[in-house]
Amino acid sequence: MSEKQGLFAGLRVLDCASFIAGPAAATIMSDFGADVIKIEPPGEGDSYRWLGARPGGPVTEHDFASLLTSRNKRSLALDLKTDAGQQVLRRLVASADVFLTNYPLPVRDRLKLAYDDLRGLNDRLIYAGMSAYGETGPEAGKTGFDATAYWARSGLMDLVRVDADAMPARSTAGMGDHPTSLALFGAIVMALYRREKTGLGGKVSSSLLASGLYSNGYMLQAVMVGAAIPPRQPREIVSNALSGMYHTLDKRWLTLAMLAEERQWPGLPGVLGRPDLLDDPRFATNATRRANARALFDILDAIFPTRTLADWRAVLDAVGITFGIVGTTDEAADDAQAHLIGAIRPFADRPGMTVDSPIILDGEDKTPPRQAPEVGQHSAEILAEAGYSGAEIVALLAAKVIA
C-alpha cells in the first residue's frame, strides 16, 4: 500500500458494513487519509454494488453506487461464516483503530461481530454500530432502510406533501443514509478524541430513526410542547406570499425565502416591474402583507410566468433577494458553485466526477478520490500486511475463505 497523506493517515478502519449509512461514514474517513478496508462477502460482494441495477433506477453500465461510497477503499473478500475467516477478521481487529458495522444485531451475534465479541481483542478499538431503529428496545434487531426508518417513521414523509390530501412523498435512494453517516462519523471522531485523552477505545452508535427524528426536530419539538401541526395547504393558500413557490415562463419553479423581509421587500417591486406595490397600503408592512397574503400571492403568481428562470435568477440576485431554484439532478451535477467549493470533484484515477463529503478542515487537504475497488481486489495485499505468508494466503484462496 502506498503511503497515504491526510489528517487520518495511519488510521486503520475496518468497514464491515453493507449499503449506505455505515460505509458512507467510513468513506468520509477515507477522504481525510484513513486506510479503509471494506470487508465484503466473496462472490458478488456487498449487495449495495447492485443497487443501481434495480428496476426504475438510473440506467448506466457503471457501478455508480460503489463509486460514491467505496471510493478510496481497499476490498477484502472474506467469508465470515468460516472459522478461518473469523481468525482473519480477529487478526485485523487486533491492530485496527475503528471497526464499523451496520449488520442487524442478530447477524452480528451469529457472525460474532458484536462489541462484546471484539472488545477484548484490542482495548484501543473504536467499535461503531449503525442500525435502523437503535440498539435497545423491542425493535433493536429490526431491519430497515432510510426510506422506512429515516423518512417514513420520523414524520418527514407525512409532512412533505404538496397538500394535506396528496399522497406521502417518496424518498430518493440514500436521502437519509448520507445525513445519518455524518452522525456516525462525528461519533467516531469524538471517540478518537476521547482515546487520545484516555488511551482506551469504546463503542459508539447511531441509527436511521434517530437521524430522521433529528432532521424533523423543528416540528417534533413543537409537538412536544403541545403545538398542533397545521395540515399542509395547497400552494395558493399562503400565510406569507414572500415565502411562496412560483412558476416561470419556461415551466420551471423558484421559491422565495424572504425571511429578512423588512430589508429585502423594498427591492422586489422594482424588479417585478411593479414599483407601485411599494405604495400599496395592503403591502406597506410585514403585518399588512400577512393580512393580504393571498392578494400579494396572486400578483406574484401572475408576474413570475412572464420571464424565464434564468432571467429571474439574474434580477433577483442583483437586488439581494433570497430565493432558490428547484434544480434538477442533472443541473446539480454541473453546478458551477458546487464545483468551485469542492462539493463535486474529479476522480484522480479515472474519468469523471464524484460527490465529496461536506466537511472542510482548513489546512487539511483531502485525499484525491480514487475509484472503488473490485470485490476482493486487495485481499492478498491486506493479508500480507497482517503477517500471513504467501503459502497461507494461497491456502485461504484455495479454501475460498478469501477471494
Image (spheres, grey):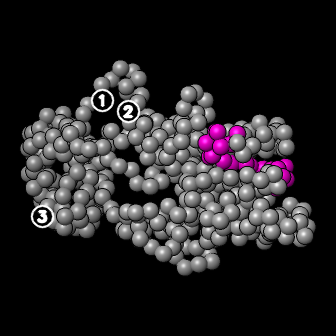
The reply, left or right, for residue 289 in relation to residue 369 is left
Quick one: label 1, few (<14), some, or many (20+) residues within 10 Å? few
- Secondary structure state at the residue bearing disc 3: helix
Q: Which quarter of the image is occupied by the N terminus?
A: bottom right
- In this orientation, which residue lies closer to the viewer: 308 or 21? 21
Question: How far is the residue under mark 2 from the one under mark 1?
Answer: 8 Å
**N-terminal label among 3 and 2:** 2
- Residue designated by label 1: 229
Q: What's drawn in magenta, residue-wise?
A: 87-109
Kindly check if marks 2 and 1 are in contact, taking CB atoms under 8 A apart as contact. yes
Q: From where the camera sits, is residue 193 visible?
A: no
| Image point (29%, 48%), residue name | 257
Kindly check if marks 1 and 3 are in contact, taking CB atoms under 8 A apart as contact. no
> Mark 1 against mark 3, which lies toward the viewer?
1
Q: Give above or below for 398 relative to 144.
A: below
- Indicate the amino acid at tag 3: Thr
| Image point (50%, 43%), residue name | 144
- Residue designated by label 2: 219
The reply, left or right, for residue 323 in relation to residue 189 is left
